[in-house]
Structures are given as C-alpha cells and as structure tokens.
C-alpha cells in the first residue's frame, strides 16, 4: 500500500474551479479558462503556483485529474507531445501576465502547468483547474504485506 500525504492550503484550494465549457470552444477555450482563472485570483494563492488541469470525464473526474496533476514532479512533461505542448503554452501565457510571486509583479507566476485528460461525452467539455502554492509539500510511505513501513520521501533512521 502506498500512501501520499499532500497538504494543500486554503488559499490555493479556494481558487480551484470546474468549468463546463461548450465543446465548440475546444483547446482555445480550455486555455482561456485556465489563464482567466489565474488572472482572477492574481497571486492570492501564494504564487508562484503549480496548476493542474483535467480535461474530460464529468465535472467530478475533471477536478480529480487536475488535482492528481499537482503531484507530478515539476520537471516532468506529459508523455504525449501534444499534451506537453499545451502545458508549455498555458505556462507561457500565465507567466507573461506579469502577476509574479505573491501577485507583486514579475515573470514567474507559475512554476509548472500539468495537464491530463479523460474521455468525455461529445456534448460537454468539463475542465478542472487545481492550484497549488509554491511549497507543494508531499510525503510518501509504503506499507508492505508484513506491515513494515518504508518512508520514501523522508526516511527514518533504522528504516
């Protein structure tokens, strides 16, 4: 059993959204939703942020995918080049807003944008946008069948 603790602050949680877009807006609409959301909260989520984007599924699946993306390493790129390109485009668009750290201005508003998707009904385009502050703390442990605990991210002496 693998357990990951991923504390998330209220400031970043309060600016997470789910948008139910019309399918005709396509990826342009998805990108606009993410950038508009970043512009709306203007540093209130302890920027620079990490943004997870989930596209497809239902509204519940979209936000779940978005939150899962927040746990990806910052240097990780999506394995599909088309999706990795979307990540880069959204990150560049947000970083050119000038919001900067803590909303005080600058070139680094987001440290990373992570995108993934699920299949969807053609009549809807759900998009989840999850935001995490710069700290992005997490800790992982594995419990084996014999109940031995291995702390992966923060080893304990004698473990």
Image: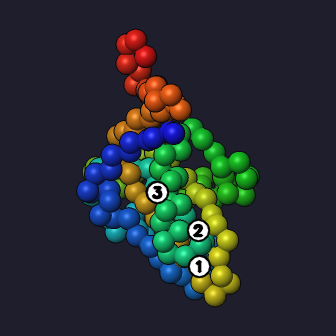
- The numbered mark, 2 or 3, whose residue comes first in the sequence reads 2
* Nearer to us in this view, 104 or 150: 150
Above or below, 154 against 112 in this view is: above
Residue matched to label 1: 125
Instruction: Tell me: 36 left or right of 118.
Output: left
- The numbered mark, 1 or 2, whose residue comes first in the sequence reads 2
- Give the alpha-carbon distance from disc 1 to disc 2, as whole Å: 7 Å
Residue 118 shows in the view: yes
Residue displayed at 28% across by 51% down = 9
Residue matched to label 3: 67
- The numbered mark, 3 or 1, whose residue comes first in the sequence reads 3
Residue displayed at 63% across by 45% down = 77
**Dot 1, crowdedness within 10 Å: few (<14), some or many (≥20)?**
many
* Nearer to us in this view, 61 or 2: 2
Q: Secondary structure at mark 3?
A: helix
Residue matched to label 2: 55
* Nearer to us in this view, 85 or 51: 51
């Amino acid at each position: 059993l693998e357990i990951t603790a991923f504390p998330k602050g209220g400031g970043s949680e309060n600016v997470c959204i789910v948008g139910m877009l019309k399918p005709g807006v396509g990826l342009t609409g998805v990108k606009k939703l993410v950038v508009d959301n970043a512009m709306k909260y203007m540093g209130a989520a302890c920027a620079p942020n990490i943004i997870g984007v989930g596209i497809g599924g239902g509204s519940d699946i979209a936000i779940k995918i978005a939150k899962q993306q927040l746990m990806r390493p910052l240097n990780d790129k999506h394995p599909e080049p088309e999706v990795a390109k979307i990540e880069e485009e959204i990150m560049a668009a947000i970083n050119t807003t000038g919001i900067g750290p803590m909303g005080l201005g600058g070139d680094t508003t987001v440290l990373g944008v992570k995108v993934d998707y699920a299949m969807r009904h053609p009549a809807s385009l759900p998009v989840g946008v999850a935001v995490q502050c710069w700290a992005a703390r997490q800790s992982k442990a594995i419990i084996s069948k014999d109940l031995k605990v291995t702390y992966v991210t923060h080893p304990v002496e004698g473990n």
